[in-house]
Image (spheres, helix red, strand yellow):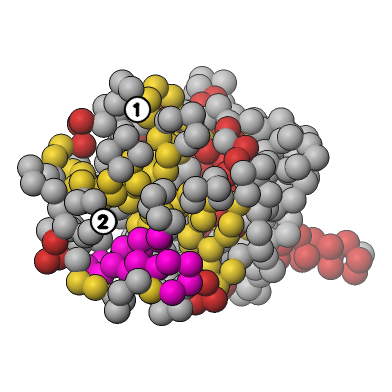
Amino acid sequence: MSARVGLLLRALQLLMWGGLDAEPPEPGGEELRREAEVPSSKWYKQHLSYRLVNWPEHLPEPAVRGAVRAAFQLWSNVSALEFWEAPATGPADIRLTFFQGDHNDGLSNAFDGPGGALAHAFLPRRGEAHFDIEERWSLSRRRGRNLFVVLAHEIGHTLGLPHSPAPRALMAPYYKRLGRDALLNWDDVLAVQNLYGKPLGRSVAIQLPGKLFTDFEAWDLHSPRDRRPETRGPKYCHSSFDAITVDGQQRLYIFKGSHFWEVAADGNVSEPRPLQEQWPGLPSHIEAVTVSLENGDFYFFKGSRCWRFRSSKPVWNSPLLCRAGGLPRHPDAALFFPPMHRLVLFKGARYYVLARGGLQVEPYYPRDLQDWGGVPEEVNGALPRPDGSVIFFRDDRYWRLDQAKLRATKSGRWAAELPWMGCWHANSGGTLF
């Protein structure tokens, strides 16, 4: 073997992580020691695109896409990384592909059918994860190899994580059955945070909601994927925001962490601005906000405290303790509801109507959220629209409430479907994410 060929083979060995095997070998194997010799690698950006190239024919496409999205979200929940699905054509940072047998990764990495090697992945900037298409893949806890678990493991490798010596870690070198315990071990969390940092302005969640593990078929994944984004757009467009409101001129104010964005009625978005620049003394991570459409005052809520600003000046000696008026701690969202000329707070399965001009809960409240037919619990924003509807937000989804019927008549993904949210490119008319 020539020296050049030998160097090439060594480079390829360093480029690829060891694959995920179905069963552990006999004690004393060398796999963990080999993994420890691979130098660390990472992406030098925090916003990564991915593409699902193909999938097993016996699994429905929406279910597989749901599993892929959940697997990426598992890692974004515990790090500063954010992911979005790239269009069908053009580049993508990470590509997920199913192959049969030898697929030009070297004979030692050829897939071997059911059992044995399940998948393997490459270091960052190669951005490839390969899966054995002949494996008995499933999205169930009880039969076959759970695709979600293997996706999450191989995605960890594409982010630069080696195999973990912790036997309960997701990044352990052997297949981990899907149970009801947290899928990520703290060894996994510390490893990804060591490369990319902690989640910005979010608590660490080491497991997605349990229903997502088993009910991928219920995911609504019909967001546009056939256009390449021309820019990344505001940060809130591809992650959740803390709070949102609208003023009398139909300017949106969208809050995330210690900054906010103004969005004009035509969808043009300002640069992010520090909260302290506009509202001195206001803390970061506001939980709820609304604007009175009668006097233009801003009402902010966080924990048991509330603030009222007229322009940039506090109306009272802010903050006030709101519990005295019967307001809930840590409200989910606030709304000025024009038909009642009242502020409304939402918390869990209840809502609170406040007395006019004050912060006192009206008699006979709180009431059950079922009064607002079809609006989900734990929304993170609500605002009235000029057509008389009310839009409720939770994570990446919205619900349009018909005021006359007091019931939700439409829902979807706000970044893709609501141009006035500022996530559409002014020239292309396409969504950014």
64 within the magenta span: no
Task: Find disc 2 in the rendering and name its residue.
Answer: 357
Label 1 neighbour load within 10 Å: few <14, some 14-19, many 20+ = some
Secondary element type, mark 1: loop
Report the side of 244 relative to 46 (left or right).
Answer: left
Amino acid bearing label 2: Gly
Give the quarter of the image for residue 295.
Answer: bottom left
Q: Main secondary structure of the magenta part?
A: strand
Pick whichever, 338 or 155, lies toward us. Answer: 338
Residue span colored magenta: 297-313
Q: Where is residue 290 in the image (x, y as percent from the top left)?
A: 38, 54
307 within the magenta span: yes
Q: Tell me if residue 350 can be seen.
A: yes
Report the side of 296 relative to 99 (left or right).
Answer: left
In the rendered picture of this protein, how many numbered marks are placed on residues? 2
Task: Find disc 1 in the rendering and name its residue.
Answer: 403
Q: Quadrant of the C terminus?
A: top right
Q: Position of residue 412 (x, y in %)?
A: 48, 31
**Sequence-wise, which precedes: disc 2 or disc 1?**
2
In the image, residue 311 above or below residue 402 = below
Q: Position of residue 282 (x, y in %)?
A: 41, 74
Q: Position of residue 52 (x, y in %)?
A: 63, 37
Pick whichever, 428 or 191, lies toward us. Answer: 428
Report the side of 66 relative to 283 (left or right).
Answer: right
Which residue does the image show at 55% across and 54% down from the upper left? 236
Amino acid bearing label 1: Gln
Query: Mark 2 or 1, which is nearer the eye?
Result: 2
